[in-house]
Image (tube, coloured by chain):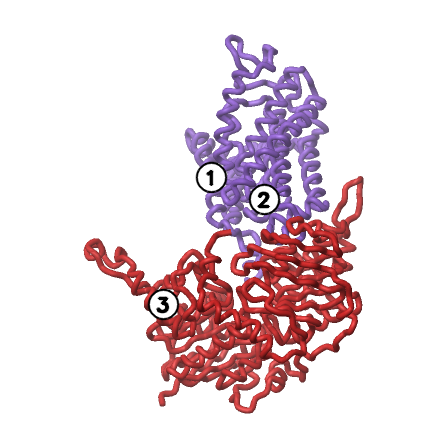
Amino acid sequence: MRNIGKEYYGVRVLKNVSIRLKKGQILALLGENGAGKSTLMNILFGMGVIHDTGGFEGEIIFEGKEVKIAKPSDASELGIGMVHQEFMLIDGYEIAENIRLNREISQGNILSRIFGKKLELLDRRAMRMEARKTLDSLGLEALDETVEVENISVGYKQFVEIARELNKKNIKLVVLDEPTAVLTEGEAKQFLDSVRAFSRQGISFIFISHRLEEAIEYADTAAVLRNGELVAQCSMEGMTAEKLSEMMIGRTVELIKREERQESAKTGGILFSIRDLHVAMPGERVKGVDLDIREGEILGIGGLAGHGKVGIANGIMGMYPASGTVLYRGEPLHMEDTLGTLKKKIMFVSEDRRGVGLNLEASIELNTVIAALRVNQEYLRKFAGIRFYDHRAAAAYTAKMIKEIDIRCTSGSQPCKRLSGGNQQKVSIAKALAMDPEVLFISEPTRGIDIGAKKLILSYLVKLNRERHMTIIMTSSELAELRSVCDRIAIVTEGKVAGILGPDEEEYKFGLLMSSSIQKKTGEGENDEEDKTPV
Amino acid sequence: MKKIKRLYEAIGFSRLIIIIFLAILVLLTFALGLDSAGITSDVLVRIGLNSFFVLAMLPMVECGIGLNFALPLGILCGQFAGVLTVEWGLTGIGGILAACLLGSALSAAVGFFYGKLLNHLRGSEMMVGTYINFSIVSLMCIGWMLFPFFSDSRIKWAMGNGVRSTITLDGFYDKVLNDFLAFQIGNVTIPTGLFLAFGLGCLALWGFQKSKTGIMMKVSGMNPMFGKSIGINNDRMRIMGTVLSTMCGAVGIVIYAQGIGMYQLYTAPRNMAFPAIAAILVGGATLKRANIWHVIIGLTLYQAILTIAPVVSAQLIDDGSSLSEIARVIICNGVILYALTKIDGRKV
């Protein structure tokens, strides 16, 4: 067997890290946010950031030879591919075009023979067939390769990203940066199964993940980083999630523990009564949801990505056009009137915290108080009849929240874009709480954030529910998370509520509710068609 | 070394060039033995005269639209109000105040419709603004010929119809603000009234930024989706920003006109938006971010160059004044072009 070894020695965020990976193996790269995982991978891939900031130390040995990777195209030539955390797809292009991007298959014609290769025409059929083959090998028979990327759900986009890498002929190593963060559990499993199948064919993978369970299940070895240093590279055999997280965080942590149930949630009166809700949110359409929400409960909304679970909260808060009736405390709620809804002390923490939930350019302080300032006229003081921003009150409240939910920052005036994902999420929550809401819609509260912050946010939500008697509607792709904090869990499939289960129901029942529709979907294949119509 | 690098990053490439150019000009004035006190007085007056045009860019950037290429909308309103005050024979500070108030009221209405239009044309506001600028100035050329409001012989042509191309303010409020409480330091004249007006304008806008509406406008401009999620009506904020900007334009032309002693009508306002845009960009503003300091720094640098360059070049070269005019156009349009290529602005 031919050994492929790679070694890195870096400084600054990385200190003397060396990892090695054999051909056809899967390496799980683990570590808290900011441990240096992405930096390490950027070095491997020759990303511009590395060289703009003074390069790196150490060497990379690929297939027994020392190689210089100065730019991403060098890495591509060597057969190293990368799937980034953020999607790098062109929305208006169809899937096949995205997969073959920059490696288009072209046909010669008269003009091209005279004027050169640039004038060759695309051979779309060959491109589609190529793309089809790769998609099929990923188990995506249902996905039409001619659909434009902007019309497919987040989960499918992730598949397209990896299909692009795997479609390359000379591919030897693929780096996956949190590939499953945006996938639901079912999709993640499908995804990782196909990754494993590819690794059997001799392609190596490095994958970065926050989900320890899947790392244990799928990876051959694990490399754990902490504060830029390699804690250990070890075999996955006999490894437990507890052991791994201990290595990551450096102290023993318990994984998210199931909270005690509360009885009152079962007896609370009906707060929201949602009938026949339709929401035109692209990629997350809601097509007729009926749902009752009880006062004082934590209701979980789960389901696969792209099936509309995220659309419910967005529709009710007026972020996307919605129809249907929503009764709040027996009175109809006007969904398009966001301000009116907010005034009823119904607040929303968006799943898109960088785009909608926060104003990244603005300071933590402004982000925290702005909603309360807008809706409740707080943090203002009158001077000559005009209401001015009350910096002192705002700063005081922000300081209090920074302490209470442990936002790691230099001060309240730090702009939000300088914060890590977990801390940004905490600011989003602080923003919602400043309004002192009675009802809180919170979507994907733990997406892409590390275990420490995840645990804190979830237990804080439970605390809000118990102590302030806040009704919380939490939408999440992670079933385990929903099961650990919710009183009831509604599973949304194909834009409708497929069923409501208690958190202690067995896992397969949830799976059934989610997957029953997948089979249906493969048969019909009309869902994609419908999503194509522009909003 | 690091300190120098940080300083350079804070100043930015384009501002550095302008500063170096200005420094060379200043050195040359001394080397050539020019009347530096007179030049300084000129620079101060020009800063004051152009101040409100540059201030007008601020609310427009703040609410997320970008730079106001249709500033002449406000300027025309101000001119119309100003010529009316001349027709009514108002003089002194009272005349200026009346012209400002009337101009503001008119431009508020005009700005409202301009804002509505821009809300329908999201994404190409600056291009639309440029075309509105050119077309409205031409339209007003017809207007000046046909308006029935004016009868004074100092306003109307001696024969035929229409208003004169320049309305002199001699005997009305010529240089009233320039001379208000003006005093001398050495040979340099400080136009106190002008700076008081500029200061008031800055203070008012600064206060607005700190008010509830101002904060909401800023938030909505930075991230409209975020604004929507907390119940801010983004369209209304954009209209408000446009109205404020247009009003600044109206006040600006009244102050400008009293300083140069006349209203220049017809096609004169056509190119008035560009120096103001260039000035705020020289000050370090981008299409997404601007603050009062960008206005003050930019105005000072830009007007200083414009004032000093012709004097110096006239001394150095024969027919230097036309050369300086060419330099002025290159600087003004070059700066705008440079800023537009960096549409996301400098990373902060």
Q: Is residue A441 above or below residue A323?
A: below
The front one of A356 and A130 is A130
Label 1, label 2: how far apart the Cα atoms are: 19 Å
User: Residue B31 in the image: x percent, y percent?
Assistant: 51, 39
Task: Indicate which label's residue lies in the foreground, 1 or 3.
Answer: 3
Label 1 marks which chain's residue?
B
- Which of pointers 2 and 3 indicates the residue nearer the eye? 3
Q: Which mark is residue B333?
A: 1
Please name the amino acid that badge 2 sits on: Val
Mark carried by residue A99? none
Quickly name the residue at label 3: A131
The amino acid pointed to by label 1 is Asn
Secondary structure at numbered mark 3: helix
Whether labels 1 and 2 share one chain: yes
The relative height of residue B1 versus residue B266 in the rendered view (above or below) is: below
Q: To which residue does mark 2 refer?
A: B61
